[in-house]
Amino acid sequence: DGGITQSPKYLFRKEGQNVTLSCEQNLNHDAMYWYRQDPGQGLRLIYYSQIVNDFQKGDIAEGYSVSREKKESFPLTVTSAQKNPTAFYLCASSPGQRNQPQHFGDGTRLSIL
Amino acid sequence: AQKVTQAQTEISVVEKEDVTLDCVYETRDTTYYLFWYKQPPSGELVFLIRRNSFDEQNEISGRYSWNFQKSTSSFNFTITASQVVDSAVYFCALSEAIGNSGYSTLTFGKGTMLLVSP
């Protein structure tokens, strides 16, 4: 089945550690997105990529990094510079055009040890 | 900048009641697209509906209906005869063009948590 796979489902980070969240899609979508969700908050855009080898900062990119070496993959690294990383992270993809909905993965819940 | 407001943080109803979730948006674009998503307790967001700005026809899908009113910048969502399985967080979102690229990002409201009790 076509879809978006995020892994792991749960992740724990130690102080000063970088961690990487995986996102893979087999929908042949050009665009991919990373969102952060905090309790009582909507989704806030971290990074997005419209095409391979290109990505743009969203509203809250500080402390995060991404890469887009393959169309299917858009991993997110939460660096030690992100002082409050505990949140639910959602990856999405879409064909990219404005009238197309984004399709979401099941999310990764990141916590601090 | 675009903005989406979902003023209702949480709504509690008893099964079989009708419930309306409000969404008000702000944009300077003349052409735009609105979306509703459902987030059940499992966490993933499920796409429900898309509406473009030049089509004000209301839509009904089973127990779900959507009322788009451009004059009041609202895109409200009604669930008729609610069921326990409707319990979820519902998000309204507005597409935002990225320059002239043809691509877009979404601006989300903060969501409305709907609790349907038996």
Image (cartoon, helix red, strand yellow):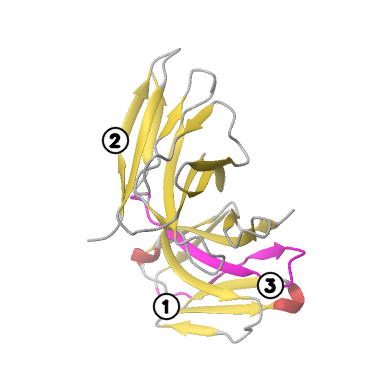
Q: Residue furthest top?
A: A16
Q: Residue furthest bottom?
A: B57
Q: Amino acid at mark 3?
A: Thr
Task: Give the labeled residue for mark 2.
Answer: A8
Name the one closer to the observer, B47 or A96: A96
Task: Give the labeled residue for mark 3.
Answer: B31
Magenta-colored stretch includes residue A61: no
Residues in magenta, as a range: B16-43
Task: Give the labeled residue for mark 1.
Answer: B81
Please, which chain is the residue tagged with disc 1 on? B
Would residue A48 be found to the left or right of residue B39 on screen?
Answer: right
Residue B44, image x and y in percent? 37, 52
Residue at point 39%, 65% (across, down): B86
**Callout in the foreground (2, 3):** 3
Q: Is residue B37 visible?
A: yes
Would residue B76 be found to the left or right of residue B1 on screen?
Answer: left
Q: Earlier in the sequence, mark 1 or mark 3?
A: 3
Label 1 with label 3: CB-CB less than 8 Å = no
Q: CA distance from mark 1 to mark 3?
A: 33 Å
Residue A39: give its label: none
Residue at point 49%, 67% (across, down): A100
Residue at point 43%, 54% (across, down): A93
Q: CA distance from mark 2 to mark 3?
A: 38 Å
**Callout in the foreground (1, 2):** 2
Q: Secondary structure at mark 2?
A: loop
Dividing the picture into quarters, in which one does residue B53 lie? bottom right
